[in-house]
Image (cartoon, grey):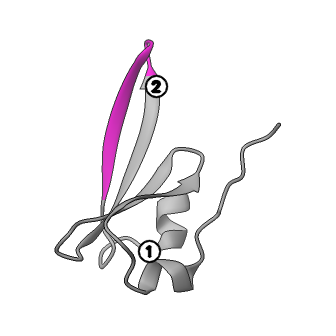
Amino acid sequence: MAREIDKLSARAVATPTKPGRHSDGGGLYLIVDPSGAKRWLFIYRRDGKQKEMGLGGLMSVSLAEAHR
């Protein structure tokens, strides 16, 4: 079964959500801190190890830019 991608909408990203990781599929996550700050995180595997790459805060990086 294929993974669902682009699960988050621009509206869902803009409105306040509960703290935690919110998956958009394909390894892209919107992280919401308890303070309400939002940032993008990409999780991937390289050489058998899980790696994390921060893409930036929601004010600097839009949903469309995070998908690229």
- The main secondary structure of the magenta stretch is strand
Q: Which mark is residue 45?
A: 2
Q: Is residue 23 left or right of residue 25?
A: left
> Which SS class for mark 2?
strand
Say the numbered circle drawn on residue 24. Answer: none
- Provide the residue designation for mark 1: 62
- In the image, residue 45 lies at what x, y percent? 46, 25
Q: In this rendering, does residue 4 appear at all?
A: yes
Which residue is depicted at the point 54% across and 86% down? 11
Sooner in the amino-acid sequence: mark 1 or mark 2: 2
Q: Position of residue 58 (x, y in %)?
A: 33, 73
Q: Which residues are magenta?
A: 46-55
| Farthest right residue in view | 1
Residue in the foreground of this view, choosing between 18 and 59: 18
Q: Residue at x 42, y 46 (%)?
A: 42
SS under mark 1? loop
Position of 65 relative to 1 (above/below)? below
Image x and y of residue 2, in percent: 79, 40
